[in-house]
């Protein structure tokens, strides 16, 4: 059977097991269209305010705060989540040279942000069930730490909610700073007492190109993060602390505001695609979705768990069918040459996830036929292995 899948303006043709003439890409971000951004751009023309916390950035912060149920002072925008994590660690004043515990199963940005803040990553395994760092496991390991530990960065794996209460207790018991990397957690992060960073990159569920937002109920810390993003200025043009330039521009805020205007539609689109995947794999217990994905929360990637060791085979078979899949986090952040000098706890679960999880094509207007083709091809690959 020949399947013609029209994905936007691209026709994908898949015929049996033959190579498809075009690929189904793993993602195709869809940000607000120009006509939806235009009213905001006109406001920039009128105000002649282009950056430095202009009216659109302030409005975006107010609306983001309302979305997260926080006061406006509990939110500050940043140029992107990587800069936001660095600004947060610098503003927490974690002494340079200390260790920063984090999961090995994360994107390289988590560890790069720590390094930029002068900290050394200490990599931990994640729990097999949750794919996330376990507060009790980190606490138990502290007595064997390679040196003083100044901070921990738990990560929401591909947006999946984590044990926030457990991390609040960890901070209380140990006195160690906890900074949540919720890069993909726009839809899933619950406002809490811990500082947290969300990415607004084009590949995230609420995208504005490049952007991020720092959230924290400690408004004094939010103020310090904001000051960090403006050269360490604190109300005057005199820098009182080290700072950088990681502000969001008015143009980015224009896209962010237009994206917020259509957030309910965006979310419904992603939920629809998530549920379509669940239906397509229904009855195939070899493919597992993150708990609540598409049901309670959504993200802009769809990463599924496969039987141990089968991800490379599935990726090859999908590729042959013209379907792009991705190992978003490769073998883990600890495997990057940039982190070769960092201590690593034993990471069997991370290793297993690298071999048994895969990012499937996922985007707002991904056609049902494409989802069904991906599911069929994945199941064929898993049958082949027997
Ligand atoms: C876990 C994690 N942390 C941080 C980042 C960095 O976000 P940004 O691209 O906004 O800097 C990403 C990006 O995908 C991520 O997945």
Image: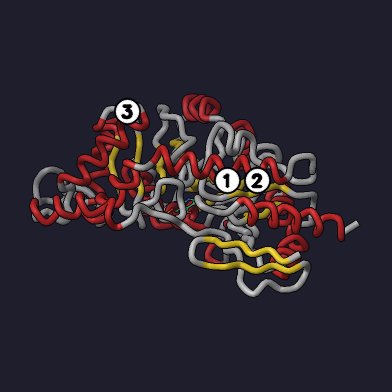
SS of the residue under disc 1: helix
Q: Residues within 10 Å of mark 1 (few under 14, many from 20)?
A: many
Point out residue 13 in the picture as x, y percentages from the top left corner: 65, 69
Point out residue 135 in the picture as x, y percentages from the top left corner: 58, 33
Please state if 172 lies on the left or on the right of 53 as rendered. right
The quarter of the picture where the N terminus appears is: bottom right
**Residue shown at the point (57%, 68%) measured from the top left:** 11
Point out residue 200 in the picture as x, y percentages from the top left corner: 39, 49
SS of the residue under disc 2: helix
Please state if 159 lies on the left or on the right of 80 as rendered. right
Q: Residues within 10 Å of mark 3 (few under 14, many from 20)?
A: some
Asked whether disc 1 touches disc 2, contact meaning CB atoms under 8 Å apart, the reply is yes
Q: Nearer the viewer, residue 127 or 243?
A: 127
Q: Can you identify the residue that label 3 sits on? A: 70
Disc sitting over residue 277 in the figure: 2
The reply to whether residue 249 is visible in this rendering is: no
Q: Nearer the viewer, residue 382 or 341?
A: 382
Please state if 41 lies on the left or on the right of 301 as rendered. left
Point out residue 341 in the picture as x, y percentages from the top left corner: 56, 62
SS of the residue under disc 3: loop
The reply to whether residue 283 is visible in this rendering is: yes
Mark 1 to mark 2 CA distance (whole Å): 6 Å
**Residue shown at the point (73%, 69%) measured from the top left:** 15
**Residue shown at the point (75%, 73%) measured from the top left:** 18
Foreground disc of the pair 3, 2? 2
Mark 3 to mark 2 CA distance (whole Å): 33 Å
Q: Is mark 2 within 8 Å of ligand 1?
A: no
**Residue shown at the point (24%, 32%) measured from the top left:** 73
N-term-proximal mark, 3 vs 1: 3
Can you say whether 143 is above or below 44 in the image? above
Q: Can you identify the residue that label 1 sits on? A: 273
Asked whether disc 3 touches disc 2, contact meaning CB atoms under 8 Å apart, the reply is no
């Amino acid at each position: 059977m020949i399947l013609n899948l029209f994905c936007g303006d691209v026709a994908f043709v898949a015929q049996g097991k033959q190579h498809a003439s075009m690929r189904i890409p793993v993602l195709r971000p869809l940000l607000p269209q120009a006509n939806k951004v235009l009213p905001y751009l006109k406001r920039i023309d009128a105000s002649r305010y282009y950056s430095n916390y202009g009216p659109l950035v302030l409005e975006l912060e107010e609306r983001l705060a309302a979305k997260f149920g926080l006061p406006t002072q509990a939110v500050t925008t940043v140029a992107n989540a990587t800069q936001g994590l660095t600004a947060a660690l610098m503003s927490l004043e974690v002494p340079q040279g200390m260790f920063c515990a984090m999961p090995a199963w994360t994107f390289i940005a988590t560890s790069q942000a720590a390094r930029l803040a002068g900290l050394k990553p200490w990599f931990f395994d994640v729990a097999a069930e949750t794919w996330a760092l376990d507060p009790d496991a980190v606490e138990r390991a502290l007595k064997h730490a390679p040196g003083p530990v100044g901070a921990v960065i738990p990560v929401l794996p591909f947006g999946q909610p984590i044990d926030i209460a457990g991390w609040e207790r960890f901070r209380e018991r140990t006195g160690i700073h906890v900074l949540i990397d919720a890069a993909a957690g726009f839809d899933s992060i619950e406002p809490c007492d811990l500082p947290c960073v969300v990415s607004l990159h084009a590949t995230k569920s609420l995208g504005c190109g490049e952007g991020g937002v720092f959230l924290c109920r400690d408004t004094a810390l939010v103020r310090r993060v904001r000051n960090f993003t403006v050269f360490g200025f604190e109300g005057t043009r005199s820098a009182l602390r080290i700072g950088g330039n990681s502000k969001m521009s008015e143009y980015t805020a224009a896209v962010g505001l237009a994206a917020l205007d259509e957030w309910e539609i965006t979310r419904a689109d992603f939920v629809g695609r998530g549920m379509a995947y669940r239906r397509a794999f229904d009855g195939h217990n070899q493919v597992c979705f993150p708990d609540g994905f598409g049901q309670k929360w959504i993200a802009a990637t769809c990463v599924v768990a496969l039987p141990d060791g089968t991800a490379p085979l599935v990726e090859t078979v999908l590729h042959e069918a013209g379907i792009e899949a991705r190992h978003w986090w490769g073998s883990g952040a600890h495997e990057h040459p940039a982190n070769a000098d960092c201590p690593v706890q034993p990471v069997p679960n991370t290793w297993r996830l690298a071999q048994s999880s895969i990012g499937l094509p996922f985007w707002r207007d991904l056609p049902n036929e494409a989802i069904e083709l991906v599911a069929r091809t994945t199941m064929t690959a898993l049958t082949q292995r027997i």
